[in-house]
Image: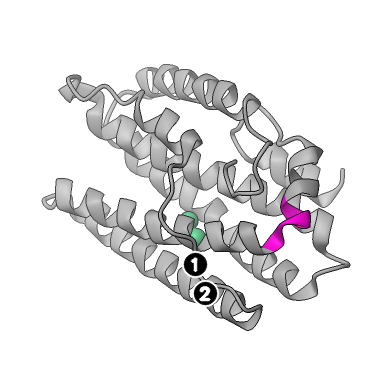
């Protein structure tokens, strides 16, 4: 197995990103990085929004606080690299893939709302890890500095999807969680199959 195949096998996702996306992102690397910085900022905000929603859940507050701090450090690192390359962070934009995930959260289902919010976090981290790893293979010889960044960030995102998932595991029965997770994975796969057409992290 190649490194990429190993990473994909360790992630829960049902589909692999098509190689055409990696070629596109490599051809528009600064656009990818500018969007990547926004993703890191949004990841920090998502973690903090969960702290705001569940302030009495001490384990969640501790872990999401740590996650947010780490995402902010990622944001700063991507920003420094962007500046060095003569670019800035993108304006906030609509992330169709993330929007497609968030729209499936059933706000009225109090019994699983927290679980769903955590599973969405897990999916965002897992797919980001898979995308970073896919792009890394494409650019490792031509863009060593960006490759180093992706190499460093990939393992963090891998830790993060598990962090979200393990927080969800505390909330409901294992069988129920598996069924719920399967539904989310299939939904994500459907959204991902429509992607690969923009040089953004989830495009
Ligand atoms: Fe990150
Ligand atoms: Fe992350």
Relative to 150, say whether 203 is above or below.
above
Q: Under 8 Å from ligand 1: the CB of mark 1? A: no
Q: Position of residue 77 (x, y in %)?
A: 53, 76
- In the displayed structure, would residue 75 be above or below residue 38? below
Is residue 54 in sight in this rendering? no
Relative placement, left or right, of 109 versus 75 is: left
| Residue 22 pos. (x, y %) | 76, 47
Label 2 secondary element: helix
Question: Is residue 116 visible in this depiction of the protein?
Answer: yes
Locate residue 9, reporting x and y percent. 71, 37
What's the magenta region?
A: 25-29
In the picture, which quadrant includes the N terminus? top right
Q: Secondary structure at mark 1?
A: loop
Residue corresponding to mark 2:
79
Q: Look at 46% across and 18% down and name the residue there.
A: 183
Residue indicated by mark 1 = 89
Q: Tell me: 105 left or right of 93.
A: left
Q: Is residue 137 magenta?
A: no
Q: Nearer the viewer, residue 132 or 196?
A: 196
Image marks 2 and 1: residues in contact by CB distance under 8 Å: yes
Which of pointers 2 and 1 lies earlier in the amino acid sequence? Answer: 2
Task: Indicate which disc residue 156 carries.
Answer: none
Nearest the eye: 81 or 88 = 88
């Amino acid at each position: 197995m190649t490194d990429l195949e190993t990473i994909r096998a360790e992630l829960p996702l049902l589909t692999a990103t098509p190689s055409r996306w990696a070629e596109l992102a490599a051809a528009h690397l600064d656009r990818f990085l500018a969007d990547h910085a926004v993703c890191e900022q949004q990841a920090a905000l998502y973690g903090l929004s969960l702290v705001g929603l569940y302030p009495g859940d001490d384990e969640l507050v501790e872990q999401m606080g740590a996650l947010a701090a780490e995402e902010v450090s990622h944001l700063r690192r991507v920003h420094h690299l962007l500046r060095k390359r003569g670019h800035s962070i993108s304006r906030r934009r609509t992330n169709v893939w993330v929007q497609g995930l968030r729209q499936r959260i059933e706000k009225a289902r109090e019994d699983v709302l927290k679980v769903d919010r955590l599973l969405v976090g897990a999916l965002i981290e897992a797919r980001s890890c898979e995308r970073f790893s896919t792009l890394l293979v494409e650019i490792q010889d031509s863009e060593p500095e960006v490759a180093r960044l992706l190499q460093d960030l990939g393992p963090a995102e891998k830790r993060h999807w598990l962090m979200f998932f393990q927080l969800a595991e505390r909330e409901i029965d294992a069988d129920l969680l598996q069924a719920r997770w399967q539904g989310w994975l299939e939904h994500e796969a459907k959204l991902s199959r429509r992607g690969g057409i923009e040089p953004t992290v989830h495009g």
